[in-house]
Amino acid sequence: MLKIGGQRVPHKTVLLVLSDSVLIVIGLLLASGLRLYQSGLFSGGFEGMRTVLRFGVVVLVCELSLYYHDLYDFQILKRHSEMFARLLQAFGISCAVLALCYYVHPPLSLGRGIAALAAPTILAFSLGWRLLLDKADALLHRPERVLIVGTGPAGISLTREIISRPELNLKVVGFLDEKGENIGKSLVNPGIIGAVSEVSSIADMQKVDRIVLSLAERRGCTPSQQLLHLKFAGVPVEDAHSCYERISGRILLERLSPSWLILSSGFRKSAFVLACKRVADIIAALFGLVLSAPVMAAVAVAIWLETGSPILFRQTRTGLFGRHFQILKFRSMYQNAEASGPAWAAQDDRRITRVGAFIRKSRLDELPQLFNVLRGDMSLVGPRPEQPHFVGLLQQSIPFYDQRHTVRPGITGWAQIKYQYGASLEESKVKLELDLFYIKHLSTLLDLAIIFETVKVMLLGRGAK
């Protein structure tokens, strides 16, 4: 099972990525073969590593374009008209990028004739394969049948997550009630189909592949002997919080006990990993400052022309181990916008300038934080630092909030790419669930995945306020 950090990548997604690569190569082979056959060069047209490199460049550019157009999101694949429009855009941009590559380095080019034949062929293959996948899920394997033992809120949240993500290929067959008094009642869909005391017989009758425990009260309600029998019979048994974490990339706070966090694997921060992370931060920040210098200069001029100085905005934030530091950002609000006190940003916030709206949406306002990274206040990847005023409020309302300060805050992070801007207590709770997942599975691979996804967030302007 492929995972990024601790989150499972659905088999269906992996299949789609691999099959896209194969289909692109087949399309190129067909187009090349037809073109070379017409030219009488077919016998020698595929020799040498140069052809492999040319094909590899096309596959890489096309895969990146498909990814950045959300064409591995199975919710979009169900909206056929939108999927077709995105495919056209993705392959259109791929053609433009490849044309630029060929202009810069002509030996990479496959030739205009091959490109003219390959483009519509690959588009047709990609569209047809996605339509087939949408209509024929059974071609992969039957959905894994999941039984929720108990009616606790964690199990209900897990079921909602499974229903919203068909690519997981999971099917919840029902819930078991702790006392067996509410059989037939609908909790989500499906509802309660039996009592907890009947778990063994119901699991056999429903041909269950996995059992998930979500007992509202475990004391005196856990059918230990039956669960032990099922476990030894080969049926996986796991806690709802662990299952939710694995498929969603969040550590659900609903009824989460400290013992789960204490006994759970992960949360390791070796000195070597932290040292590598810090060295990577310094190198990336230096490169980032050099590469972004023209953009930062343009943003500074735009801010000064609209609202004058100061160009930069400094604000106290809470960082590693709860220490305070001054975060640097390009000013996106009118001067003295928070004179009456700090407030969460909102949609259509009147405090934000026209330039500010643009740089917030494109995340360009965050660029000066590269100086914070060099100073050691922040990392490239980590939980977003919050103002001390809000930290005090959130610590009182959200359990385990202090734990997000056990790593350096970041310019981007798992919560930033997976969720919208946190501008309320409930949204901050969801973002903490994502931050805890990141802290638990802290690794170089997860950081790279977050940076890769951040590029998409910046290009599409998601989550900004």
Image (cartoon, rainbow, N blue to C red):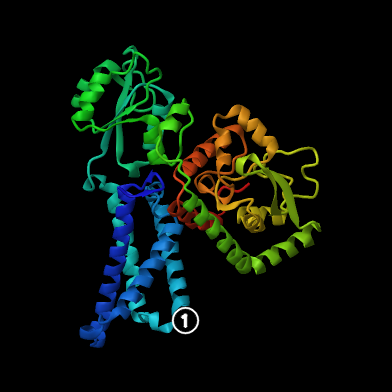
324 lies left or right of 168: right
Q: Quadrant of residue 345?
A: top right
Q: On the image, which quarter does residue 458 sit in?
A: bottom right
Give how far across and how far down residue 129 sits, in percent: 29, 57
In this rendering, the count of numbered labels is 1
Q: Position of residue 67 (x, y in %)?
A: 42, 58
Crowd around label 1: few <14 · some 14–19 · many ≥20 (10 Å): few
Residue 88 visible in the snapshot? no
Relative depth, front residue between 332 and 41: 332
441 on left or right of 350: left
Name the quadrant containing residue 237.
Answer: top left
| Residue type beneath disc 1 | Tyr
Can you say whether 39 is above or below 124 in the image?
below
Residue at the far bottom: name it. 40
- Residue at 59% x, 45% y: name it: 384
- Give the residue displayed 44% in from the left and 44% down from the top: 441
At a point 56% along the width and 62% down the height, the residue shown is 284
**Could you tell me which residue is drawn at 61 percent across and 44 percent down?**
320
Front-most of residues 132 and 413: 413
Compared with residue 374, is residue 53 higher up or lower down, i.e. above or below?
Answer: below
Residue 371: where, in percent of width, then height? Answer: 66, 58
The spot of residue 216 in percent (x, y) is 40, 19
Task: Look at mark 1 in the image and give the residue it sits on.
Answer: 103
Picture layout, residue 125 above or below residue 53: above
Element class at badge 1: helix
In the rendered image, is residue 343 in sight?
A: yes
